[in-house]
Amino acid sequence: MGLPVRLFDAVIVGGGGSGMRAALELARADLKVAVLSKVFPTRSHTVAAQGGVAASLGNIDEDNWHWHMYDTVKGSDYLGDQDAIEFMCRKANEVVYELEHLGMPFDRLAGGKIYQRPFGGHMRDYGVSPVPRACAAADRTGHALLHTLYQANLKARTQFFVEWMALDLIRAQDGSVLGVTALEMETGEVMILQAKATVFATGGAGRIFAASTNAFINTGDGLGMAARAGIPLQDLEFWQFHPTGVAGAGVLITEGVRGEGGYLLNKNGERFMERYAPNAKDLASRDVVARAMATEIKEGRGAGKDGDCILLKLDHLGEETISKRLPGIREIAKKFANVDPVKDPIPVVPTCHYQMGGIPTNYHGQVVVPKNGNPESVVPGFYAAGECSCVSVHGANRLGCNSLLDLLVFGKSAGEKVIQDLKQDGKSHRALPNDAGELTLSRLARLDGQKSGERVAEVSADMRRTMQQHCGVFRFPDLLTEGVRKIKDVAERVSRTGISDKSRTFNTARVEALELDNLVETAVASLVSAEARKESRGSHDRADFHQRDDANWMKHTLWFKQGSRLEYKPVHTQPLSVETFEPKARVY
Amino acid sequence: MRFSIYRYNPEADDKPRMQAYDVALEPTDRMLLDALVRIKAHDDTLSFRRSCREGVCGSDAMNINGKNGLACITRIADLREPVQIRPLPGLPVVRDLIVDMSQFFKQYDSVKPYLVNNDPPPEKERLQSPQDREELDGLYECILCACCSTSCPSFWWNPDKFVGPAGLLQAYRFIADTRDQATNERLDNLEDPYRLFRCHSIMNCVDVCPKGLNPTRAIGKIKDLLVKRTV
């Protein structure tokens, strides 16, 4: 049975920040574009970003892109690619001003310029002291950004396929990408969306962890599709644990709280970050702060009745500042932590937040894989941007506010690259391979035909527990080894799940089962990559190899689903126009 | 805890029914969404939308004990049992708690919810004073959950003609923006017995908005501007 086929110049999978930024670029080029989104676009997870978008506008204090670049390279613990990082930091002002021109309601300074606040790891003069670099709309920057991009796309008449879930990548014999299969959730219909260019903007897979700031929809769909189609996943051992998730609930409390002057306390009321990062203190990099907090808790200085959280104090900022600059935080704290931060500190714990790794790309958004000795051979017709991609600008640890910047810069450059490639070589569609859609049909047939089987909810809970226990802030050799075994078991079980709902109309049980296929690829990749990396770097902290080992490990991991095999490729240490920032000890 | 949940699957049911559930909740289940997710773990046929689970994405709007709200920020402890859960009223039901929101989004689109400024953009940002920016507070925060419009009797009667509180709030968000140059066109677009003037200040919208926004006030300001324009 063949699937119906629809033809487009470009298909963008994902309607979050990077997908809509790419769509906006394509809309200006008179191409036939489809943007697929599992949810109505403004419900994408970009909406939950709070603190700001990084750009060295210098609206408050002197700043420049080279300082931003230095901070990002240092923040990445020297695993970030310096060409891509230079590219991103140099483009930052441009993409932020563009957003303002589109109508983004940034907060303003007295003279009318965009308001900026300090953020973790963003410093003046190559690491000397914090600089206000986070361009903010209160603590709802992601909401303001995502809605602005959606509105701009409405104006540009972008064609959205809302509540469509892409299921599998379609590749030609020579490896080129020819589109995706996709499920229309409302009708249950499946079809092939064939395209000359396929852009993945599917976001992260933060839902592989039990304690996560991520939305339910962050199931790594792009990563799963790529992995099943033979594309490797890069650097997935690097997961960011955000220092301040609400204890127990996981909901994010922005670093902007500390940017505005809030700080962390242990149970003794000690401002412990002064011991771990004497210079930047609470505004050190996220990996550093998360580890410090976990250490305080581990050593018995955690707060709360079970001693398992840290307190985030901000009452001294005063009700006026809190209501003006951090209104969403106050709302969240009241609802999810039962505290009013105007009076009481918020109990927080490090919580899985961001996936530094992803589908390997270059800074044009082209997906690159090893081929014939070239570690970065372009996959024709395939692009990725935003959290699902690994450019890599974040390396082993992302700086706050660099995620919104990443999705703007690389969403845009992926869009530009698609236009350029289609102009050069995009006259007609290629023939689909005979087996296009077969993988998808077999996955769906399995779910439809399965009479019994483990519940999806149970297996996914086991996956999340395994990741949480075996691949957290601190990593131990025995736990990693055992974790690899356990997660491979979970992956086996995923292929035998059963759902009782067999209907076509908005079958969310089926969607969740299909999402689990994607989540588990990411989870296996993460644990296998983490177990193999015998050093500590950025967010990957091993008890048995406690130091960074540049001689042996300053390289990117590539995980292939086939045989769960690993390869490595070099870090780009050569920037585009400036000198290399040589690795050195990372102190804040 | 006891729940009574609206169920309807067009493939299997002739008409909607209420299904009773009695579930043992865990201490970590604090919000209604936690309870729904737990129910779904046992009965995977129960269908509802959800995403951020923190009240910012607007996916899980539903009618809870008679009042529209977001499941993810509705505390279980505050709910009377059995908790009656129905889809948002006034929109066609696709399945269970999932409604067809096309009409709602069509009205949102109809106000041209994007900045119109025909001047060539400056090299840097357009300047806007903090006071002018403050005019957008209480407007730009809308998450398009549709709690307001689907609690509005005027929207129930005329969903194709009355823009509804969510759309009108966004119309005013751009009217109020000093960077926008299309105020006159925006007012023209609303000067109509139905589009704007079906609002009778019943204020259900204000009562249910999970973000604490006030569409009625924004609608009042649009009406004021129309009056000012004619005198």
Image (spheres, coloured by chain):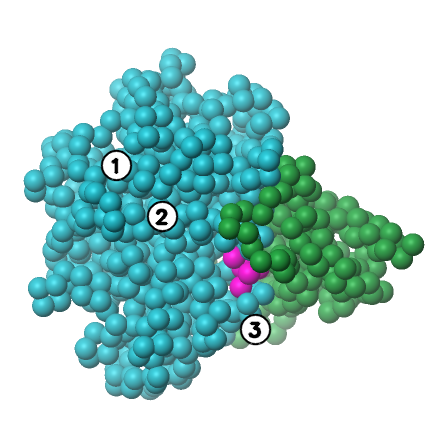
Q: Are marks 3 and 2 in contact (CB under 8 Å)?
A: no
In the structure shown, which secondary structural element does the residue marked by tag 2 occupy? helix
Pointer 1 chain = A
**Dot 1: element:** helix
Distance (Cα) linking label 1 and label 3: 56 Å
Where does the N terminus of chain A fall, quadrant-wise? Answer: bottom left
> Which residue is at a point 51% across and 50% down the rendered structure image?
B123
Amino acid on which disc 1 is placed:
Lys
Residue labelled with disc 3: B10
Magenta range:
A149-153
Q: Amino acid at mark 2?
A: Arg
Say which residue appears at 33% left-offset and 36% top-offset: A67
Of all chains in the rendering, the one displayed in green is B
Q: Chain of mark 3?
A: B
**Numbered badge on residue A289:** none
- Quarter-of-image position of residue A585: top left
Task: Say whether disc 1 or disc 2 marks the residue closer to the N-terminus.
Answer: 1
Name chain A's colour: cyan
* Residue A345 in sight from this viewpoint: yes
Q: Is residue B147 left or right of residue A482?
A: right
Which one is in front, A480 or B198? B198
Type of residue at label 3?
Answer: Pro
Looking at the magenta stretch, what is its main secondary structure? helix
Q: Is residue A339 above or below residue A387?
A: above
Q: Nearer the viewer, mark 1 or mark 3?
A: 1
Chain letter for mark 2 = A
Residue A6: quarter of image: bottom left
Give residue A74's mark. Answer: 1
* Distance from the alpha carbon under mark 1 to that under mark 2: 17 Å
Q: Where in the figure is residue B197, as x and y percent of width and height? A: 83, 59
* Mark sitting on residue A90: 2
Residue A204 visible in the snapshot: no
